[in-house]
Amino acid sequence: MFDIYIYIGIQGTDVAKQASDIILTDDNFSSIVKAMMWGRNVYDCIAKFLQFQLTANLSAGAISVISAAAISSVPLRAVQMLWVNLVMDTLASLALATEPPTEALLNRKPYGRTKSIISPLMLRNILGQSLYQLVIMFVILYAGQFFLDVTSTVQEIQENQQAGRKISGQFTMVFNAFVLMTLFNEINARKLHGERNVFKGIFRNPFFYCIWIFCFVAQILIVTFGDKVFSTARLSIKQWGYSLLFGVGSLIWQQILLCIPIEPFSKCFSAVYRTCCPWCYKRQKKTEEEEEKGEEEEEEEEEEEEEEEEEKEEEEEEEEGEGDHKKF
């Protein structure tokens, strides 16, 4: 059973053309290889953006909910989240969606028809990077006054609730560290299948590094000159150094995540998928069983064909031997 029917444009018939899904106008079968490359590349680009977007939203959502419950204030202001979600994420989608295809895509097996676009590897990256970002932001929020030369806004809010509305150097550090960790995690998001070298091929896509540099420069301008518009305070060189350190740390943390076994995430992902969408899970299992059954039938047919060919060869050899014997 085929998923796609291909029609040869020049030599094919009209009946075949009507029943086909893809038409080769030049009768060149190398076009099919290019189509496969682009199809897999589009799928990967969507997965890359989802990996990046879910990590950023999970971290931002968690820090907002927990801090609102704990200190009755949110370190990430509405206008700051507007910059992160509408501008940065939109540009990130453009950067990750314009990755050019490579021949390495053809070395992988095709994705299943019912396979979830979020793989266990992606789930490990999303949860791991979100955990790293949350830990860093909470360290800044509750211990930043000890090493960042900022006043403790959390203590001020506990004494006076109105202090949470003022421009805070501590909250600015949380915002700046979050944006830089998100920017560096965008580099990590380029890889989906456990590759170690996250910088490989980064200069093949000028959109990516141009957008990345633009967002980095824009973040510097927002923090330095944002003031009341973006509710930011100017940071010192030391504070910028720590922010960059936290951002680069996401690249180092990604290498540590790659050492974690994937089996627990596979089981967790299967359990969540089975609980949230049991009908989809049953359908996926049924499709996988049908595909396995089809593969077994194909193997049996191939074995039968090989046996038939061997029998024919033996019969031909026997006939040739009998003919030679009669001649003799």
Image (cartoon, helix red, strand yellow):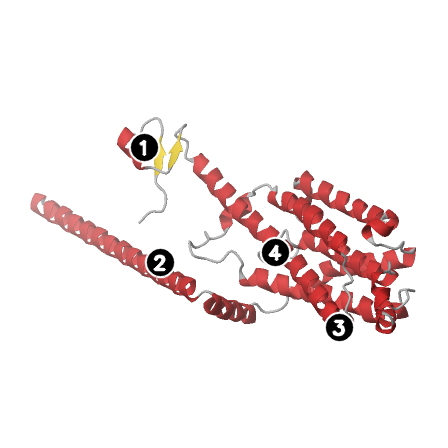
Q: CA distance from mark 2 to mark 1?
A: 28 Å
Tell me the number on the disc at residue 165.
none
Q: CA distance from mark 2 to mark 4?
A: 28 Å
Residue underneath mark 2: 291
Q: Are marks 2 and 4 in contact (CB under 8 Å)?
A: no
**Amino acid type shown at disc 4:** Gln
**Which tag, 1 or 3, sits closer to the chain's start?**
1
Please tell me how crowded label 1 is: few (under 14), some (14-19), or many (20+) other residues with Cα within 10 Å.
some
> x and y percent of residue 97 in the render?
60, 44
- Splitting the image into 4 quarters, where does residue 91 fall? top right
Q: CA distance from mark 2 to mark 3?
A: 51 Å
Camera-nearest label, 2 or 4 = 4
**Amino acid type shown at disc 1:** Lys
Residue at coordinates 22% horizontally, 51% vertically from top-left? Answer: 309
Q: Is residue 185 left or right of residue 289?
A: right
Camera-nearest label, 3 or 4 = 3
**Which tag, 2 or 3, sits closer to the chain's start?**
3
